Image (cartoon, helix red, strand yellow):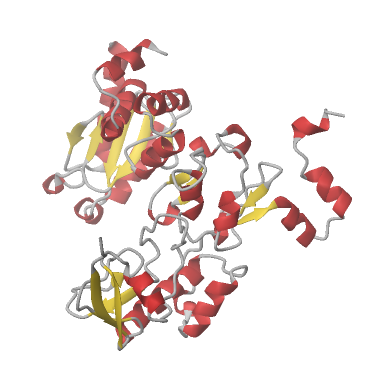
Amino acid sequence: MSEKYIQLTIDGTPISVPAGTTILDAAKEADVEIPVLCYFAHTTANGLCRLCVVEVEGARMLQAACVVAAQDGAVVHTRSPKVERARRTLLEMLASTVDISESPELQALVAEYECFPERFEGGKKRQPVVIDDNPVYLRDYSQCVMCWRCVQVCADDAQFTYALNFSGRGFDTQIATFFDKPLTETTCVFCGNCIGVCPTGALKAKREYLIEQGVAPEQVLELTRLKGRKNRT
Amino acid sequence: MEEALSEIFLQFEGKREEIIPILQRVQENYTYLPEDSMRQIARFTKVPESDIYGVATFYAQFRFTPTGRNHICVCRGTACHVRGAPAILEEVAANVGLEDEGTTEDLEYTLETVACIGCCALAPAITYNEEVHGNLTKNKVRKLIKAEAGKNGSE
């Protein structure tokens, strides 16, 4: 059985892809790069960050390339003024509310799109305190961009532990555990998947953090040892 | 499991889409959502605890601390605001012994502000234990709280 192929044009390049391919994947085929933030090859795409929006001729609104399937005969522009403006505004809002100092990819995008986050100066920033409740990793949600990847790998996309999810709403949304309990009191198994998929410095291995702080290696081991193990001499 | 909780669960099938009605019923019963009930709801609906917490924290209607025996909502909608809601709020707070929104230590009063209670023609308005009182003045607020406190005392 042969797959049905469709033809479309991305930034002037004609391309043929199997029906059902997302615009993002089709663009990859056409060697056109679309910036992404929440999209991750191994988690379910949700179109949350809207950074991958593209202009499809005839469509009423910009389309999130990571979730929208390419249509036969579509003419897609990935870097039109409308697209650039949308991405710039998004990046400016992110850069003005979230600490992106440990996110080089985001910083590069802010520079590439000639963002001016200062125009939102004086606005509220997300500045929750760093959560240090276990020997494995730290959670600094002032750096969190709400990509949802940590929640996804904690749930049906990898580990099936369901320790994390969103809490709150709007500006106060934050990744949290049940009743904001310390991770050691949740279903968390410390698999580390969430740290691995975090696109910013929000989730960081405690050892990495302590070394950055200049703590001596022997002390680092002492500080990150699980309590149960200590008794087993 | 507490009897009240099992009785509430009896009226549901334990489906994911029933989470919000279940949360509402549980809150009606306890005036808030106790942690243990939240765990039981997770088990009953077979939805992770973190998800239940996510749903409950999303909606302004759900709370996690007990409320007072008397529940006062001061409307801060546009109509009430222009007709003096800030002064009404101040007056209610002063009369129940609070600085701002919150619950008194003796669990007698919970004071809340809401965006609109849907009777703009009666602005400024409040609800006192779900009963609407409109066209308020500071004086009327004082009298209302006094009268209600007297009612409670005689019961």
Q: Residue at x 42, y 81 (%)?
A: A31
Tally of numbered tags: 0
Q: Residue at x 45, y 41 (%)?
A: B99
**Residue B130 % position (x, y):** 22, 30
Task: Return the residue found at the far bottom.
Answer: A12
Instruction: Pick whichever, A95 or B86, lies toward us.
Output: A95
Q: Where A11 sits versus A224, above or below?
A: below
Q: Residue at x 40, y 13 (%)?
A: B2
Instruction: Pick whichever, A8 or B67, lies toward us.
Output: A8
Q: In this view, does A228 lie to the left or right of B108?
A: right
Q: Where A148 sits versus A88, above or below?
A: above
Image quadrant where one finds the N terminus of chain A: bottom left
**Residue A35 % position (x, y):** 44, 74
Instruction: Pick whichever, B139 or B83, lies toward us.
Output: B83
Q: In this view, does A70 lie to the left or right of B54?
A: left
Residue B33 in view in this figure: no
Q: Which residue is drawn at 69% across and 45% down?
A: A136
Image quadrant where one finds the C terminus of chain A: top right
Dividing the picture into quarters, in which one does residue B119 lie?
top left
Q: Where A6 sits versus B59, above or below?
A: below
Dividing the picture into quarters, in which one does residue A39 lie?
bottom left
